[in-house]
Amino acid sequence: MKKFFQEIKADIKFKSAGPGQKLTESVGERAPKEKPNQPAVRQPRQGPTNEAQMAAAAALARLEQKQPKARGPTSQESIRNQVRKELRAEATVSGSTEAPGTNMVPEPREEGSAHLAVPGVCFTCPLTGATLRKDQRDAHIKEAILSHFSTDPVAASIMKIHTFNRDRDKVKLGVDTIAKYLDNICLHPEEEKYRKIKLQNKVFQERINCLEGTHEFFEAIGFQKALLPVPDQEGPEEFYVLSEAAVAEPQSLQRHKDQLLVAEPVRATLARQRRVFRPSPMASQFDLPGDFFNLTAEEIKREQRLRSEAVERLSVLRTKAMREREEQRELRKYTYTLLRVRLPDGCLLQGTFYARERVGALYAFVREALQSDWLPFDLLASGGQKLSEEDSLAFNECGLVPSALLTFSWDAAVLDDIRAAGAEPNSSILKPELLATIEKLS
């Protein structure tokens, strides 16, 4: 069979060699018989001259200038992916491995994952003490304020005015106008005209009626609606009229006015979600949920604008200070950060913070967990950088976002006292109730 295929191949090669020639024919006799359309042998192509290369480069530069400017990613997921790609590229170029405490942007995990460092960002309601997720806090606070009307309608209406209305300028204008009404009543208790407020008055409509909770406040402090005649007008108008009982207690009106002026919006506070872990080689690994990477619509627009500006700056030489400012701007996109502190015995104390909180908040968090909370100590970031408790820097300005590992270190004087007393400086320093809740870092 092999010989059969070899014969077929030889026959094909023989036929493709062209017509045969007699051995007695000369070269001159064979020449006319060659095919006239046989392609000539190509000469090697010469490269472009220097002038042609310069002209091509100039044309390419003009073409690039006409190209539309690149736009930054608009979707939330594309922003996350772009940030991760840039940081990975920077790590690859530098060729450095991650040291303990160095911040690497982790992949966001699903909140149901059992390996998450924290289940998500949680908040505490100041009225009920309930722990809430991000999507629950606003509805829960509104419900708590409304339920407060049954026990203290004045306080509930004040909370509603400051919390339900988002425009702080309008709230301040409306509150100042209400305070002016009450001041007139307290300063002129005998003047009946100050005890009546016309609801169709232009000032009342523009400054007070547009705010939620104002009508509840007037009714809670003793105003009642009534139809009263108006001079030079056929039909009556609706007024708020202060009751005689409220007029007899001007101190109460003054107290309610002061409460209204100093009140603040009711906002859920960030839950630290304090956890204590046993010593682990995975202390610098953070598996964060999507809450730590979520951007609001305003933040997405801001990132798009910043990236568009960054494209324009690529052609401009930047100083070191300019580059540092841009790096800080990149870190400001995070709202939350997860921090771990390695204690002298190797245990890890973990908590959740706002990215814009000051370093002093971390010192206070650690001090609350210590048995001897009056002893001075230091917190060291990656590379041994000391973070000062008195420093006004925020976590995002220190590069401690969206997660970081820090090291606890005793003050030098305290360490000398510990050693002089014959104690072990690396012994456990946490409160016993926290040691009872210690977990394994998975």
Image: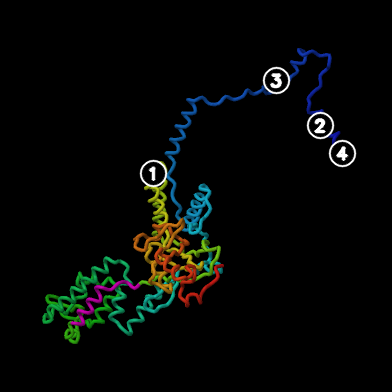
Task: Name the image quarter holding the C terminus.
Answer: bottom right
Label 2 Cα neighbours within 10 Å, binned few <14 / some 14-19 / many ≥20: few
Q: Residue at x 36, y 81 (%)?
A: 147
Q: Earlier in the sequence, mark 3 or mark 2?
A: 2
Q: Which residue is mark 4?
A: 2
Q: Earlier in the sequence, mark 4 or mark 1?
A: 4
User: Image check: 287 left or right of 217?
Assistant: right
Look at discs 3 and 2 and give the one toward the viewer.
2
Element on which disc 3 rests: loop
Q: Are marks 3 and 4 in contact (CB under 8 Å)?
A: no
Look at discs 3 and 1 and give the one toward the viewer.
1
Look at discs 4 and 2 and give the one toward the viewer.
4
Q: Mark 2: which amino acid?
A: Ile
Q: Which residue is mark 1?
A: 318
Element on which disc 1 rests: loop
In terms of depth relative to the viewer, which is nearer, 106 or 260?
Answer: 106
Q: Earlier in the sequence, mark 4 or mark 2?
A: 4
Q: Are marks 2 and 1 in contact (CB under 8 Å)?
A: no
User: Image check: 98 left or right of 139?
Assistant: right
> Compared with residue 143, is residue 120 higher up or lower down, i.e. above or below?
above
Q: Mark 3: which amino acid?
A: Pro
> Between marks 3 and 4, how big is the CA–CA gap?
40 Å
Q: Mark 4: which amino acid?
A: Lys
Look at discs 4 and 1 and give the one toward the viewer.
1
